Amino acid sequence: MHRERVSENVFWFQSEVYAQVTAGVIVGPQWAVVIDTLALPEETLGMREFIEHELGVQVRYVINTHYHADHTWGNCFFPGATVIGHAKCREFLIEYGVPSLESARKQNPNLRQVKIIPPHLTFESGELTLRVGKKNLIFSQAFGHSQDGISVLVEEDRVLFAGDAFMSLPYVVDGDIDDMIASVKRIGRLGLENIIQGHGDIILRGEIDAAVKENLNYLNNIKKAVKSAGKRKNVDEYLEEITIESCGKSRVHLGGLAETLHRRNLRSLYRQMHGEE
């Protein structure tokens, strides 16, 4: 697991095991806030070990940027912490997370100790704020990747934990492409020092404008290409010809997963626009 200090009392973690998924910690004088929980128990527990023994504080709050397993299944390893998320995050974890975990346990014995802990404190609209020492955290909606996405802005440092609303390759299979475009545009207007992507490396200030433009370009390109697919006779063949490079991205992103995610994006968009293939 990679770890880096982003700014004073703000830390970033990145999995070396699963899809470069990320998490964060904001440390106050007496307690800490965790943003997302990584994918596997050993990495979540490694993060907790660092917080408790290296930083010397307990975790009081865990923020879930959305309900997907690689961001929430570690909630249970912070006993006593209050979990915060969007109201739909709570709904989705109960409806989908519980059966998904039961199924995953059959494949992976390491998940036997995992328990689904839905958010205790939720919000549906507007913003939520939380003070951690000298840092003010602002929670806002960030839809597109999913219908329950939120981002967390460390206001004083202009550091944004964007969740999966911002990734090396935008992924819209469980969300809505127009919502994603709106979220990426909003992120580009925030005047940030850093973007902590839900998956991928930290985006630095000098890289943000280019990253925003690249993600918007990709989203608009796949939207345009899939819209044209409705006029084609052989849809499968046509979709196969829409390469990730022709849409403005590289297949090397996310440790080589980008090509697979791109293919899923295209087929999901086709179903949304034209019905089942």
Image: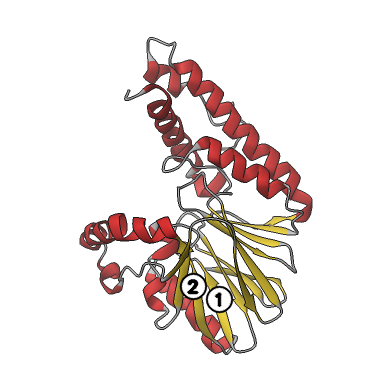
> Residue beneath label 1, please?
33
> Residue beneath label 2, please?
62
Q: Quadrant of the C terminus?
A: top left
Q: Are marks 2 and 1 in contact (CB under 8 Å)?
A: yes
**Residue 63 visible in the current orientation:** yes
Q: Left or right: where does residue 258 sit relative to residue 162?
A: left
Q: For residue 87, which quarter of the picture? A: bottom left
For residue 172, the mark is none
Marks 2 and 1, how far apart in space?
6 Å
Q: Left or right: where does residue 265 sit relative to residue 118?
A: right
Q: Give residue 131's position: percent from left, percent from top.
A: 64, 76
Q: For residue 102, which quarter of the picture? A: bottom left
Residue at position x 44%, y 33% from top? 263
From the viewer's perspective, is residue 99 above or below residue 82? above
Q: For residue 95, which quarter of the picture? A: bottom left
Q: Give residue 155's position: percent from left, percent from top.
A: 71, 66
Residue at position x 55%, y 76% from top? 33
From the viewer's perspective, is residue 173 above or below residue 200? above
Residue at position x 75%, y 69% from top? 156
Question: By what rule are the colours in the image chosen?
Answer: secondary structure
Helix, strand or loop status at disc 1? strand
Q: Give residue 180's position: percent from left, percent from top.
A: 55, 41
Farthest residue in the left direction? 106
- The amino acid beneath tag 1 is Val
